[in-house]
């Protein structure tokens, strides 16, 4: 019986394997010069296509990403809304308010000054919003700093006054806090209306700094300079009234009374030193009540004029090749400061996109920010598209009402 023969490769164990013997040269004829040239062209074209893909796919991906969203914002402090009818711009030089430094240390005095033209007869008052964890101290007639109430105008002098010394103390819950101050002029009698100006200072908390600060002047100098109470009575302006600063003293190493008996006596010319308690985060003389409340409201829908990068409001259908935009505001209508926050937006792009903003600044009661949110690649298969805004989507801000944190815009679109 004949056994069929199969050419199987020899089976060898790993230990007995030997280096392969080079194969004998092929008997096939070498390629012609035309074949070699064609092969070279094919390889070159293939490498070029690979290079095109490697280079342009990331570029196209970046274009899709960068074309999605742009955001612009404008901040409006609460004082701007209250004084909108009487406040003039800096260019008209009505009432310009400045600080001695844009950044001040917690517990250290700084100067708030103002320029007012034209000069009129009346009085000036300073006011500031209630801020959680912030206390403000103003000097009394004797130059001793005392806690000042927030949210009400405090008289700081007559027509000749052009500055006031202030101390702001932070409880250190955050390193930097923005604090706004408004100065309002109250004319005497019916001599015109009120005029206001405002400024913002950043308060830096440093744990390594002492909160021991010298008073504005010595006791003897203050008594010689201080006018009588009748001279410093609050003036009734054309609108509203101005409160007198409180006379309560700050806990201090020395008091504003001369000691008697066996104790040491206060000597004229000796500087006094006052210590200021850190304000608690939930209570205190100048602390606000209630909670923050961030409210989002629609202002307009429209598109961006790419020629000059301006927002154009419209109620007409928008062409899908335009940069669709929505304008809205976020305002703190609560009774205390809203800490830093963000917002999210669901955008009707192709494909759909969820945008998350960067952290936004703290908002005092009454402060607001206007946003313009623009995006490309809007879907064009519907007569209108929906843009949904959600402020503080993770509920990190303690608010009195979470129900007004969301809003939906409906933007008319011209179908393709």
Image: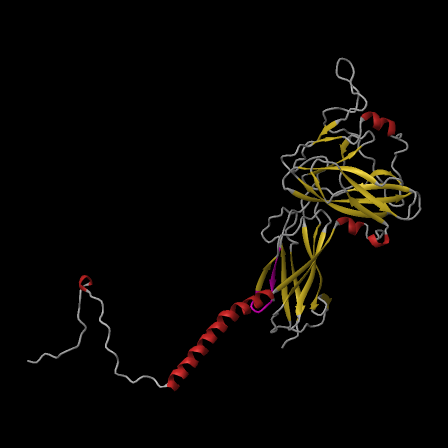
Asked whether residue 89 appears in the rendered view, the answer is no
At which x and y percent is residue 341? 63, 51
* Quadrant in which residue 247 is drawn: top right
Residue drawn at (19%, 73%) of the image: 9
Query: Which quadrant is home to the N terminus?
Result: bottom left
Q: Is residue 350 left or right of residue 168?
A: left
Residue drawn at (70%, 67%) of the image: 302
* Quadrant in which residue 144 is drawn: top right
Colouring: secondary structure
Which of the pair 234/65 is nearer the observer?
65
Residue drawn at (17%, 66%) of the image: 12
Asked whether residue 139 appears in the rendered view, the answer is yes
Position of residue 312 relative to residue 230, above or below, is below
At which x and y percent is residue 104? 71, 41
Q: Is residue 212 left or right of residue 93?
A: left
* Quadrant in which residue 71 is drawn: bottom right
Q: Is residue 50 magenta?
A: no
Q: Is residue 349 magenta?
A: yes
Position of residue 12 relative to residue 293, above or below, is below
At which x and y percent is residue 377? 61, 70
Label total for image? 0
Tell me where the magenta segment starts and ends, as one range.
343-352
At which x and y percent is residue 129? 74, 43
Which of the pair 206/244 is nearer the observer?
206
């Amino acid at each position: 019986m004949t056994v069929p023969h199969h050419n199987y490769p020899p089976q060898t164990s790993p230990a007995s394997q030997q280096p392969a013997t080079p194969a004998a040269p092929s008997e096939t004829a070498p390629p012609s010069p035309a074949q070699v040239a064609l092969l070279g062209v094919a390889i070159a074209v293939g490498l070029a296509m690979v290079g095109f893909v490697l280079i342009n796919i990331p570029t196209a991906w970046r274009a899709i990403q960068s074309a999605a969203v742009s955001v612009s914002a404008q901040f409006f402090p609460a004082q701007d809304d209250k004084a909108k009818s009487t406040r003039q711009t800096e260019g008209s030089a009505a009432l310009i308010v400045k600080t001695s430094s844009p950044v001040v240390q917690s517990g250290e005095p700084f100067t708030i000054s103002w320029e007012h033209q034209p000069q009129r007869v009346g009085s000036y008052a300073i006011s500031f919003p209630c801020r959680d964890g912030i206390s403000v101290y103003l000097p009394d007639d004797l130059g001793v700093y005392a806690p000042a109430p927030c949210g009400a105008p405090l008289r700081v002098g007559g027509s000749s006054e052009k500055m006031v010394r202030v101390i702001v103390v932070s409880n250190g819950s955050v390193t930097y806090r923005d604090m706004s101050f408004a100065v309002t002029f109250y004319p005497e009698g019916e001599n015109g209306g009120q005029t206001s100006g405002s400024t913002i200072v950043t308060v830096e908390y440093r744990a390594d700094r002492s909160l021991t600060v010298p008073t504005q002047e010595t006791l003897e100098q203050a008594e010689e300079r201080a006018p009588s109470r009748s001279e410093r009575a609050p003036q009734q302006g054309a609108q509203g009234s101005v409160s007198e600063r409180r006379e309560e003293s700050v806990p201090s190493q020395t008091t504003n009374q001369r000691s008697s008996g066996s104790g040491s006596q206060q000597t004229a010319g000796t500087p006094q030193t006052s210590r200021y308690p850190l304000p608690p985060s939930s209570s205190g003389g100048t602390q606000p009540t209630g909670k923050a409340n961030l409210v989002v409201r629609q202002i307009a829908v429209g598109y961006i004029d790419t020629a000059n990068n301006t927002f154009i409001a419209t109620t007409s259908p928008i062409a899908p090749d335009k940069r669709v935009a929505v304008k809205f505001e976020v305002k703190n209508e609560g009774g205390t400061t809203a800490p830093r926050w963000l917002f999210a937006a669901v955008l009707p792009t192709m494909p759909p996109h969820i945008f998350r903003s960067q952290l936004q600044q703290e908002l005092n009661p009454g402060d607001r920010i206007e946003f313009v949110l623009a995006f490309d690649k809007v879907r064009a298969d519907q007569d209108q598209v929906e843009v949904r805004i959600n402020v503080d989507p993770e509920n990190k801000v303690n608010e009195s009402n979470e129900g007004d944190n969301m809003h939906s815009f409906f933007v008319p679109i011209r179908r393709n």
